[in-house]
Image (spheres, helix red, strand yellow):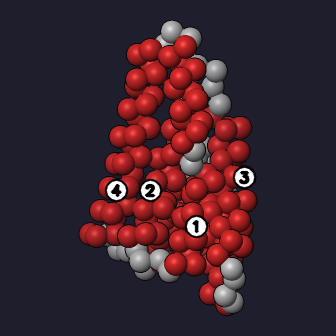
Amino acid sequence: MIATTLALAAGLLGSIHGMLSVDAVAVAVVAATAAVASFDPEPAHLVGTGAAIGAVCRHLVYLQLSSDRYPIPTLVVNVVGSVVFGLFVFAGATESTIQLVGIGACGAFTTFSSFSVETVQLWERGDRDLAVVVAAANLVLSLLGIGLAWLLVAVGPF
């Protein structure tokens, strides 16, 4: 069950405009999970390691999808991170895996602060309709992402 979840999570991260190789992400996630299984690291080390992975992935998304007009990268990382975190939680991942992948990687990959700042910046520059759409899209699509993760685990092969 967890192996399938890892493969899907790697595929989600790797498919964002081809900027990350699915194989490279899958190898990194599997290696990190195997490392967690082989010894008992401190939670802070797991969270920190995951955060380093998530921050680099987020940076790559921003490099590929940045736009002066629309805050697309923030929406993408928030939705993808919600789906990935949800998959691990609903698939019954261990506490160590949640610390590594959920709190660490997904925590650093997603961003509430950028979402908030970008929404206010849109509002201040007079794009008030777009600011409302961006705020609603981040919240609604992220929650739908969690729902999709639950559905995939509840009725799917996970």
At horizontal 56% and vertical 75% (from top left) the residue drawn is 97
Question: Which amino acid, by three-letter code, is at mark 4?
Answer: Leu
Which is nearer the N-term, disc 3 or disc 1? 3
**From this viewpoint, is residue 35 visible?**
no
Q: Amino acid at mark 3?
A: Val
C-alpha gap between disc 2 and disc 1: 12 Å
Of pointers 4 and 1, the one earlier in the residue sequence = 1
- Which image quarter is the C terminus in? bottom left
Q: Amino acid at mark 2?
A: Val
Q: Nearer the viewer, mark 2 or mark 1?
A: 1
Q: Residue furthest bottom?
A: 38
Q: Which residue is mark 4?
A: 148
Look at the image and tell me whether residue 17 can be seen. Answer: yes
Query: Which mark sits nearer the N-terminus, 4 or 3?
Result: 3
Instruction: Quickly name the residue at label 3.
Output: 56
Q: Residues within 10 Å of mark 2 (few under 14, many from 20)?
A: many
Q: What distance separates the C-alpha of mark 4 from that of mark 3?
A: 25 Å
Secondary structure of residue under mark 2: helix
Q: Nearer the viewer, residue 106 or 16?
A: 106
Q: Residue at x 53, y 33 (%)?
A: 116
Q: Which residue is mark 1?
A: 101
Query: Where's residue 153, x and y in %?
Result: 34, 69
**Label 1: how many Cα within 10 Å (few below 14, some 14–19, many 20+):** many
At mark 4, the secondary structure is helix
Along the line of sight, which residue is nearer the eye, 96 or 12?
96
The residue nearer to you, when weighing 75 against 96, is 96
Quadrant location of residue 28?
bottom right
